[in-house]
Image: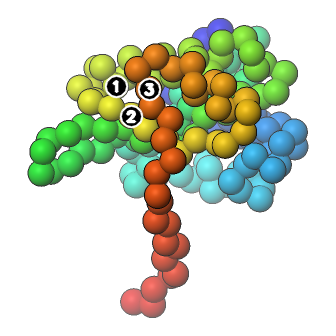
Amino acid sequence: MTFERLNQSNVEEYIAYLKTAMGEEPDKMTAENVDEQGIRDRISDPFYARTTSILAREDGNVVGRIEYHFYGCMQDGYRMAYVDWVYVLRAYRHRGIAQMLFAELEKDCAKNGIDQYYLIRARNEEADRFYGSFRGAQLQDTPLLRRYLEAQEP
């Protein structure tokens, strides 16, 4: 198992992984399709430069990923990471790949002085068992506000 950051040189393998994931479990994806050109464009878009995707590869194929970004609170200097997404293809689950992806995240957090990370987790038996195994972590039901902003006219 190898790990590498998503970049221009591996974006096509990443897209192939997303297509596989979308085909296997469309109900677990947050998108309705794989926006191939959009992904290629976002790789070099400065807006996404602070988003990190670590890809897990086996036999040359991407089989899982974790995506996150760092940010901080100006008031108290607290440094945090938000995990946007973690997903391992079904055929590769229960091999420790997701745990290894979180270990890669935690190495990056340590290198960047991050105080904590968090995510909005899936709510199913498999996810509860997985996240419940994290040492020093708390599973919470936190109230959440989500507001989608409409495109505004200039």
- Which residue position is annotated with label 1? 109
Q: Residue at (27%, 30%) from the top-left corner?
A: 115
Q: Specify few, some or many for label 3: CA neighbours under 10 Å numbering under 14, 14-19, or 20 or more.
A: few
The Cα–Cα distance between marks 3 and 2, rounded to whole angstroms, is: 10 Å
The numbered mark, 3 or 1, whose residue comes first in the sequence reads 1
* Residue 115 visible in the current orientation: yes
- Mark 2 and mark 3 in contact (Cβ < 8 Å)? no
Res. 20 mark: none
In the image, residue 60 above or below residue 21? above
- Place of residue 53 in the rendered image (x, y in percent of width and height, measured from the top left): 52, 34
Which residue type carries mark 3? Ala
| Amino acid type, callout 1 | Cys
Residue at the disc numbered 2: 117
- Residue at 43%, 38% (x, y): give it: 118
Q: Secondary structure at mark 1?
A: helix
Q: Nearer the viewer, residue 81 or 151?
A: 81
Q: CA distance from mark 3 to mark 1?
A: 15 Å
From the viewer's perspective, is the residue at label 1 or at label 2 nearer? 2
Quarter of the view holding residue 81: top left
Identify the residue at image location x=20%, y=48%.
73
Residue closer to the observer: 6 or 94: 94
**Amino acid type for the residue under numbered disc 2:** Tyr
Dot 1, crowdedness within 10 Å: few (<14), some or many (≥20)? some
